[in-house]
Image: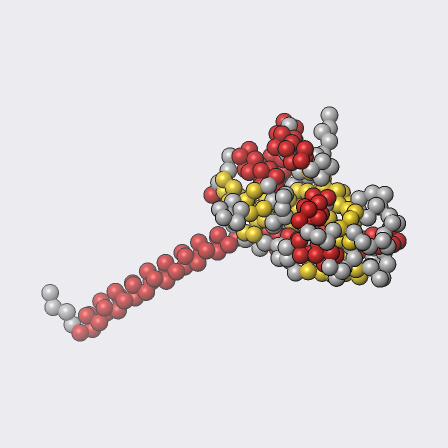
Amino acid sequence: MIYTKRACWGRLFTRVQGGYMRIILSLCLLFVSVQAMAEESAYDRVMRTNEIRCGYGIYAPWIQKDLVTGEIKGVMADIAEAVAKQLDMKLVWGEETGWGNLPTSLHNGRVDVSCSTLWNDPKRDKLVAFSDIVFYQPIYAYARADDDRFTGKMEEINDENVTITMIDGGYSKSVADRLFPKAKHNSMPQMTNWSEVILNVATGKADVIFSDDIFIKDFNANNERKLKKIPLAEPVAHFGNSFAVGIKEQELKEMIGNAVKYMHQTGEMEAITADFRAKYPGAMILPEKTV
């Protein structure tokens, strides 16, 4: 067969054009696929992969990481693992972040669930939705052991000469704003270790800290500078601890919440937390069962 010059160039152009079209088509398909994944809800992703990607903060002994193996341990980890087992899913400890950053990580889809439970602070409600309450945690006010200013009266803390230490975006600010609006704030960055925040009081950089009993007792056992509980009539708060998901993830919230309710109803939550509650009396209060 004899080809003219024009015919030869035409066939070459068609082949090149076809190659470009295949590349463009492939790129379009890739773009659509990436866009679909970006728009995929956390619930759909969990159901597709059969995995729950956890965000978490470290707060020993509630939840901690083994420095050698990287294993996540503690009663919060035990509860999260049990929830995943109830749902017949794999739990993946995906991202360690500061407690204040967890709502943002959920909202941006970097993780599916906050597996270190969060307190139901209304200021977080713009970004996250909370599951049913897993347990309640009483929080107390503490000062240096040698600070005799605080005898148990609220107004002694609610004073412009008193400084309350806290982590940015944490629960302490909401408590301080509500109960002690006159006091000054000493705020630390999100990823600050909680022991460093306590040191602000121990070293005199601040006067008061809000904490649970466990961490202060552990701090006092391992440090020369001690803290003491301010003898207020009541804890400054009883925070409900819940799993949290992105604010638009209602299906995922229901799925996690139903597993939590089932564990309370069957006594599994009581059994999983029994050793912890025996070791730390009063630190964890389970919701009362209803008839």
* Any part of residue 203 in sight: yes
- On the question of residue 174 being in view, the answer is no
Nearest the viewer among 197 and 35 is: 197
- In the picture, the quarter occupied by the N terminus is bottom left
Residue at (52% x, 49% y) in the render: 67
Image quadrant assignment for residue 244: top right
Identified at 69% across, 43% down, the residue is: 214
Residue located farthest toward the top when viewing the structure as drawn: 291
Residue 96 at x, y percent in the picture: 56, 52
Q: Look at the image and tell me in which quarter the C terminus lies.
A: top right
Specify the farthest residue to the left: 1
Q: Nearer the viewer, residue 24 or 151?
A: 151
Q: Is residue 41 left or right of residue 4?
A: right
- Tell me residue 173's x, y (percent): 75, 55
- Residue 201, horizontal then vertical, whole percent: 74, 57
Classify 260 as above or below 97. Answer: above
Q: Position of residue 16 (x, y in %)?
A: 27, 67
Q: Residue at x 63, y 48 (%)?
A: 59
Above or below: residue 7 compared with residue 217: below
Which residue occupies 66% across, 53% down?
Answer: 195
Q: Is residue 181 left or right of residue 31?
A: right
Question: In this view of the protein, which residue sits in the foreground, 34 or 195?
Answer: 195
